[in-house]
Amino acid sequence: MELIDLHTHTSASDGTDTPALLMAKAAQTGLKAVAVTDHDTLSGLDEAAEAGRECGVELIRGCEISTGTELGELHILGLWLPENPVVLQEKLAFLRIKRAERNEGIVRKLQDLGLDITMEEVLATAKGESVGRPHIAEVLLRKGYAKNSREVFKEYLGCHGKAYLPKEVLEPEESVRLLADMGATVSLAHPMLWKGPPGWIDTQIARLKDCGLSAIEALHSEHSEADVRACLALAKRFGLGVSGGSDYHGNNKPAIQLGKGYGKLRIGVDVLDNLRERRIAEGLPV
C-alpha cells in the first residue's frame, strides 16, 4: 500500500528538519505525498516543493493555524494552499508578531525566576521565522534547567508552568473562512485531543462546516483506534472528508516518525485520492 503524511512540521516553525531534509526522508520512507503544515508560516513550502520534485515526492502546500475557543485551542489545517496567498500571508505575519510578543514575555518571566536566558539565545536557536515555546525549551534544556522537554513544559512553559503566558490566536470561524475562501481544503486537526463535554466537538464541527470546514483529521499519531472510529463517524455524519497525518516534528517529538507516527500509523494514498476527488467535484484545483 502506498502511504502519505498530511501533517508535518519543519524548521520553518517548530520542527527540526529543514524542508528539504523532510522531503528527502519522506522519499527514503517510501511516502508518495507529504503536506508541510508549519505553524503560522509558509516560508518552507518553496524549498519543500523543489526538494519534492527532485526526490519524487508530491508536496501538498499547507499550514496549521491555532485558534481559540472557550475550552482552549483548536488547530486548523489548510491543505492545497495557492502559491501566493497574500491575505493569508498578512494574517500569519500578524500572528507571528503576537507570538514574538508572547515569547518576550515568557523570557522576562523566566529571567524574573532567576533563569539565565535571553531572547537573543532563543532567536539563535530557532532556524525559521515562526519562533515559539519549543525554541525556548531547547535553550533551557541546553542550560540544564530540566531533564527533558516534558519536564521543562511542566515546570515552566506549559499552561500550568511558572512562566506560561496565553497565546493570542484567531477565532476558529475566521481561520476556516480565511482558508476556505482561497480554495484550500480545511481540516480540523487531531480533534480527539481536545477534551470537552459530550457533544462539544460535534457543535464545533457543525459551526465550522458552515464556515467552510471540509475535512477531519481522523488518522493521527495520538488518536486511538476508538478515536479514529469516532472521527470517521463524525465525518460521515457531517459529510466531510477524512485526512490524516503524523504531526511529525523531527527531534522535537522524537518518538513520532514521519509517516508512521509511533510506529503503527498507516495513511493510505486513498485518503489523498478521496480528498482530491472532493476538490475536483467542487471545482477546485488539485
Image: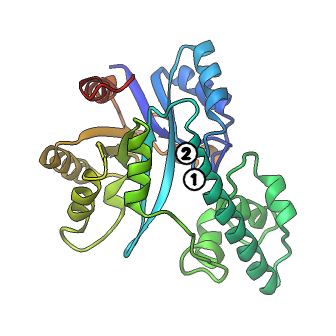
Res 87 label: 2
Query: Which residue is more in the foreground, 42 or 216?
Result: 42
**Picture residue at 52% right of the left edge, 41% below the top:** 37
Label 1: which residue?
Answer: 91
Disc 2 marks which amino acid? Answer: Val
How many C-alpha atoms fall within 10 Å of the one at disc 2: few (<14), some, or many (≥20)?
A: few
Disc 1 marks which amino acid? Answer: Lys
Furthest residue to the left?
237
Q: Is residue 120 visible?
A: yes
Does residue 201 sit above or below 274 in this rendering?
below
Give the x, y percent position of residue 116: 86, 75
Spatial distance from mark 2 to mark 1, Cα to Cα?
6 Å
Query: Which residue is more in the foreground, 176 or 50?
Result: 176
How many C-alpha atoms fall within 10 Å of the one at disc 1: few (<14), some, or many (≥20)?
A: some
Does residue 18 sit above or below 104 in this rendering?
above
Give the x, y percent position of residue 159: 54, 76
**Picture residue at 76% right of the left edge, 52% below the top:** 126
Which element type, helix, strand or loop, lies under badge 1?
A: helix
Q: Is residue 256 visible?
A: no
Labels 2 & 1 near each other (Cβ < 8 A) = yes
Chosen colour scheme: rainbow
Residue 26 occupies which quadrant of the picture? top right
Which element type, helix, strand or loop, lies under badge 2?
A: helix
Does residue 59 sit above or below 69 in this rendering?
above
Residue 12 occupies which quadrant of the picture? top right
Res 218 label: none
